[in-house]
Image (cartoon, coloured by chain):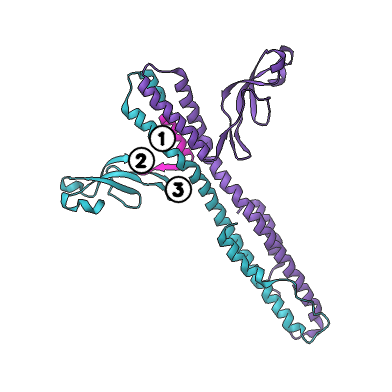
Chain colours: A purple, B cyan
């Protein structure tokens, strides 16, 4: 139960259900009946809202589970990529590890994650984190020219931003720091 | 919304809320009032059940998200372990990959997964899958003597069983096939 749902439920709880029955005092009944009906309408509205909300929160919980499983695994991929980038004098072993790396990328996709596009894209602070700038010819200004660490999305959410180098005229370099 | 919740909700929907108001016909009111109260009680019970259920189903959705993110990544670890098992003539590169492997195991633990214990344990069909048997001295019968593929748990659920070799007298070998 999330705090949001608990707060919502309070509305229904306040209505209570323990008032004494006044059947027999018929002169009071029309008003009591109307009150009881209003209470019923509120309960039905609560139930309907709650139901919609529960569906949404279940979807969020599923994604939250995915995210918390995937996040610790991204540095493992980084580590594998650093090892591969260093190269090896043993081509057979290297190829075995390179195959594992390709499998890793496709497993992350299968788990719902997608790499963030960076090199050649305009810098976008929502998905890119500028860790350095570099002076560049006019046409490249504001573009991502190098990726330091790959970023990952999960559906329309960001798992982590791509760390990138951005092309920028020297006088605007401070903008990215 | 799961089918379970949708089925449950039907109870509340059937009650409806559109009956004409009969205020003024006071001789009918005590019965109408009592009916309205009973309907209110059922609605409150529905709401309470639904709320309990939604909390549980949210927890299940979170775990389901975790499971569906972790499952495709387990074969990546297998692949890395096969590469390491083959060995390398390049000790520096090998050590880089071995470090990545240690990081992988600890990331899986951080994501909530735990290895299934196998070698030296009694064979347990709930968490072990026997892929071969081997003749063994009496004391070892029914014990797991070798692990072919590591198994993983997620909390009290099994992600995948460990594939193992079980010690067994030759005449009982068919039991494990």
Q: Counting other residues with Cα less than 10 Å from the Cα at mark 1, is it few (<14), some (14-19), or many (20 or more)? A: some
Q: Which residue is mark 3?
A: B155
Q: Position of residue B45 (x, y in %)?
A: 62, 68
Q: Counting other residues with Cα less than 10 Å from the Cα at mark 3, is it few (<14), some (14-19), or many (20 or more)? A: few
- For the stretch drawn in magenta, the main secondary structure is helix
Circle 2/circle 1 CB separation < 8 Å: yes
**Residues tagged by mark 3 and mark 1 found on one chain of the structure:** yes
> Based on the displayed image, in which of its 4 quarters is residue B71 positioned?
top left
Residue A45, can we see it?
yes
Q: Chain of mark 1?
A: B
Taking the magenta stretch, the answer to whether it contains residue B103 is yes
Residue A21, can we see it?
no
Q: Chain of mark 2?
A: B
Identity of the residue drawn at 66% across and 54% down: A53
- Classify mark 2: helix, strand or loop: loop
> Based on the displayed image, in which of its 4 quarters is residue A39 positioned?
bottom right
Identity of the residue drawn at 66% across and 56% down: A52
Q: Position of residue A112 (x, y in %)?
A: 54, 40
In the image, residue B17 above or below residue B136: below
Q: Which residue is mark 2?
A: B150
């Amino acid at each position: 139960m999330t705090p949001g749902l608990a707060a919502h439920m309070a509305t229904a709880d306040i209505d209570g259900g323990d008032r004494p029955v006044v059947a027999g005092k018929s002169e009071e009944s029309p008003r009591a009946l109307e009150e009881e009906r209003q209470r019923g309408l509120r309960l039905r509205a609560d139930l309907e809202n709650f139901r919609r909300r529960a569906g949404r929160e279940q979807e969020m919980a599923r994604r939250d589970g995915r995210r918390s499983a995937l996040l610790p695994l991204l540095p493992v991929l980084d580590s594998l990529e650093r090892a591969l980038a260093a190269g090896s004098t043993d081509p057979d072993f290297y190829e075995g590890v390179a195959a594992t790396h390709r499998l890793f990328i496709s497993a992350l996709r299968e788990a719902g994650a997608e790499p963030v596009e960076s090199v050649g894209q305009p810098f976008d602070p929502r998905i890119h984190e500028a860790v350095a700038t570099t002076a560049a010819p006019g046409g490249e200004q504001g573009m991502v020219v190098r990726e330091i660490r790959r970023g990952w999305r999960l559906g329309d959410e960001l798992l982590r931003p791509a760390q990138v180098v951005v092309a920028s005229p020297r006088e605007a370099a401070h903008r990215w720091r």
